Amino acid sequence: MQIATDDPRRPDVLALLDEHLADMYATSPAESVHALDPDALAAPEITFWTARDPEAGDLLLGCAALKRIDAGHAELKSMRTATVARRRGVAGRLLDHVLDAARANGHHRVSLETGTEDYFAPARALYVTRGFTVCGPFEGYSPDPNSTFLTLDLSGR
C-alpha cells in the first residue's frame, strides 16, 4: 500500500467520495452531514491523501484529509475506505499517516466529527484505539445529537 498526497478530483477518487456522501446522507439527517465536496477538499488549507495498491494497477483503497484550523489545530476530514479494501487495515494506516503528518506540521491537536449512528461505530472504535477522546464542538460546529466530536492531543501531555 502506498499513501501519497493526491487530487480529490481524480475520477476514481470522485467515485469514492460520491459513495461516501451517499452513505452520509443515507445514515444522517442532511443538517448533520459535514462531509466536504471534492472542490472543498482541494482548498489550500487541506491536504488530501489516497492509499493505493500499486500491485493492483494503482487501485484506490481509501482516502483521508487534514484541514488546518490554525497553527496548532487541525481537523481530520473525509476518512473513507473503498468497499473492496475493507477489513485490510487501510483506515488504520491512513489515520496513522495523517497523524504523523499533523505532528510533522507542528499541530498539537487533531479533532474530528463523526456520526453517532451504529453505522459509524467502527470508525469511532478506530479513533479510540489511537487515543482520541470525546470533546465538545469545535471550529464552527454546534452541538448535534447526530454528531460525536473527538480530539487527540499530539503533544504527549
Image (cartoon, rainbow, N blue to C red):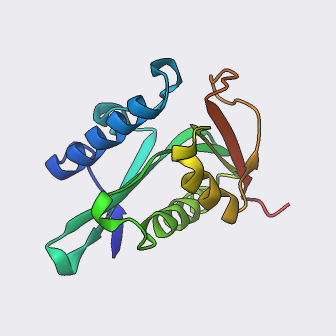
Q: Quadrant of residue 157?
A: bottom right
Q: Determine whether, in the image, residue 49 is placed left or right of residue 91.
A: left
Q: Quadrant of the N terminus?
A: bottom left
Q: Residue at x 29, y 32 (%)?
A: 39
- Asked if residue 31 is positioned above or below residue 37 in the image, the reply reads above
- Asked if residue 96 is positioned above or below residue 66 in the image, the reply reads below
Q: Quadrant of residue 100?
A: bottom right
Q: Position of residue 28 (x, y in %)?
A: 49, 29
* Residue 110 can be seen in this image: yes
Q: Position of residue 33 (x, y in %)?
A: 48, 27
* Residue 76 can be seen in this image: no
Q: Position of residue 127 (x, y in %)?
A: 63, 57
Q: Residue at x 41, y 73 (%)?
A: 88
Q: Position of residue 116 (x, y in %)?
A: 62, 38
Q: Determine whether, in the image, residue 13 is placed left or right of residue 22.
A: left
Q: Residue at x 66, y 37 (%)?
A: 148
The outermost residue toward the front is: 118
Q: Determine whether, in the image, residue 42 is placed left or right of residue 148.
A: left
- Asked if residue 33 is positioned above or below residue 20 in the image, the reply reads above
